[in-house]
Image (cartoon, grey):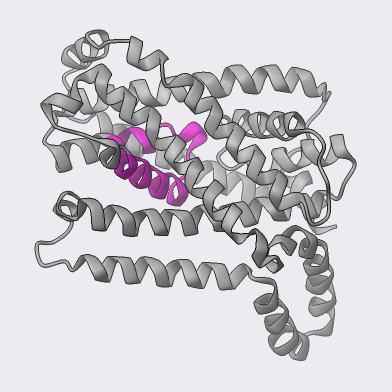
Amino acid sequence: MAKARTILKYSISLILLVISIYFTVDGIDFGKLYSAILDIDYFWVIVPLPIVVLSHLMRAIRWKLLLSPFHKSDSVLNLFSATMVGYLFNNVSPRGGELVRPYIYSKREKISYSSTFATILVERILDLITLGVLIAVVLTWNSDQVLKAFPKDTDPMKLVIISGLILLIMFLSLYPPTIKFFLDKVIKPFSEKIYIKLADLFEKFRQGFAIIKRPSKYARIAVESIFIWILYALPLYLLFFAFGFETTYSLGIEDALLLVIVSGIGVTIAPTPGAIGVYHYLVTTALVQLYGIDSETGLAFATVAHAASKLMELLLGGMFFIRENIKEIPSEEELEEDIVH
């Protein structure tokens, strides 16, 4: 069953990859694309690279806070190492790094893999909530530009409310008291055997969700979460200077943030290995539809931005993979089984 699920996941990912690449390059003049990539100021491609690394380091620092209820980490380096190895595996298997990252860290620190994995789920909730907040900010800050992608009579407040409701439902679906209520009132009356199995799994995950019970940490979590996404936007903003977008199209940090939101939502919904294809299509389409940039230049921007980011992930991920000195990584099926058992 697990193997069939893995085959299905990879098949869907491959289909998404092929379709997104097809629509991205459809009608593209490759000579013009090649020129657009060559004719930029590469100083502004190199300058953002330390910020890309800092964004990953900030994610490791926030992860330390999420782990704090059941594990006091003395080394941010170990957290950063596991994070970068996770990114390395995301470039091979969509979402595969989210299984590998907690495995590597729990193995090094000798702590529960299930609880460590649960903190990754908390991370995803936080990222979705932060995205929702940023969508509201961008709609307020840059609503005229954003609404070009929607029908003319679209009310921006409706978009904010809908986004908020979706995030609330997703948050409640993973919030421990909600899960416990569902198990006690729905599953237990239906099947004691299934209830016992799910309740046991829930107890394993409870530690990983413990940070939710600490309102005193909410402010720090909020600041760190928003800072992570700002650090995602800054390299794109600096890359505008490589293409001259800041003068030709008057693009600013709010536009870079908009691109991060568009690509973030898209890659979350339709993940491919390394976000290849999907990222290029979404960023290119946003630049073309929202700002009137030609397709070749838009794709050149997406390609350079993606390549620079992935280069850092591959280099650092490879270095830290060697550091971890792990002879063999369990398959995704085995890691999923470890979570349950």
Instruction: Report whether 301 appears left or right of 320.
Output: left
Q: Where is residue 105 in the image (x, y as percent from the top left)?
A: 78, 38
Which is the main secondary structure of the residues drawn in magenta? helix
Residue at the spot 70% in from the left edge and 38% down from the top edge: 101
For the N terminus, the quadrant is bottom right
Q: Where is residue 68 in the image (x, y as percent from the top left)?
A: 77, 51
Residue at x-position 69% and y-position 72%:
176
Please check the rendered image and state whether residue 274 is part of the magenta-colored stretch, yes or no.
Answer: yes
Q: Residue at x 25, y 69 (%)?
A: 157
99 vs 69, nearest the viewer: 69
In the image, taking residue 283 as reference, residue 314 lies left or right, namely right
**Image: 179 above or below 232:** below
Query: In this rendering, does residue 337 appear at all?
Result: no
Q: Is residue 230 above or below residue 179?
A: above
- State the image coordinates of residue 15 (x, y, percent, origin top left): 42, 41
Horizontal arrangement in the rendering, residue 191 relative to residue 133 (left or right): right
Residue 98 drawn at (x, y percent): 65, 43
| Residue in the picture at 79% in, 54% down | 114
Dividing the picture into quadrants, the one containing residue 245 is top left
Relative to 339, residue 195 above or below: below
| Residue 92 highlighted magenta (yes or no) | no
Residue farthest to the right?
A: 110
Residue 292 visible (yes or no):
yes
In this rendering, the answer to whether 319 lies above or below 275 is above
Total label count?
0
Q: In which quarter of the image is residue 187?
A: bottom right
**Which contiguous range is marked in magenta?**
257-283
Looking at the rendering, which quadrant does residue 232 occupy?
Answer: top left
Between residue 223 and residue 275, name the one nearer to us.
223
The quadrant the C terminus occupies is bottom right
